[in-house]
Image: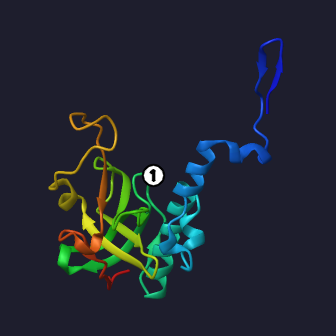
Amino acid sequence: MSNNKNNNILMNAIRAEDLGNFETHQQILDEDIDLRYTNSRFQKLKGLGPRTKGMYGERYLEELMTKEGIKCIGPDNTDHDRIIFVDIPQLGLKGRIKVEVKMSFLWKGTDHGRFQQIRQGQDYDIIVFIMVYPEAMEFFMATKAMIQKQNLPNQHGGKKAKSGTICIDCDPRKVSWMIPLEVFPHPES
């Protein structure tokens, strides 16, 4: 790990066998374990990096829509993730719906997840919130207008900043404006 010659310390590596001597390493080991997911079929998905999780969230939504006979295609631009052709009577939407997808898991030591990087200025009609509980992956939705009516915190820059990016800490089952995903195939798709 180090070589002390004439009071000069050479530190260019931490060997694997020395990791046990570092408090940081023990904190990492303690932090990454959420026992609720230990025997869950979603354990491997939970361990992936954020971008990879997001990509799989988009694919789960697309596959779910396809299995239900709903047309789902790629986006027009980078402001949304998918386009679905559905009727959503409870939201007053019909036809071609631009969807942003956000996925979260329960955070260790809490009963909620965190949906991040929600940009209110982007081109989408609804956000589909995928909450991955140890026993199930559940889909919820809200329109952009519904989200904008909430007093949600900025993700960057503190309470007074106008970053345009918000995050939502919640359990969607307990949020009245996040409603379970219920869509119907649009007749013209």
Question: Of 183 and 71, which appears nearest the observer?
Answer: 183
Residue depicted at x 56% and y 72%: 43
Q: In this rendering, is residue 88 above or below 169?
A: below
Residue at figure coordinates x 30%, y 37% from the top left: 163
In the picture, which quadrant includes the N terminus?
Answer: top right
Q: Residue 32: image x %, image y %?
A: 55, 58
According to the picture, the residue beneath numbered tag 1 turns out to be 78
Query: Which element type, helix, strand or loop, lies under badge 1?
Result: loop
Q: Residue at x 39, y 73 (%)?
A: 84
Rendered image quadrant of residue 97:
bottom left
The residue lying at 30 percent from left, 68 percent from top is 171
Against 104, residue 137 (above or below) is: below
Residue 5 position, x and y percent, is 85, 16
Give percent across and percent down for residue 60: 50, 74
Q: Nearer the viewer, residue 98 or 148?
A: 148
Label 1 is placed on what type of residue? Thr
User: Quadrant where the C terminus lies?
Assistant: bottom left
Image position of 162 (left or right of 80): left
Picture quadrant of residue 69: bottom left
Residue 138 to residue 13: above or below: below
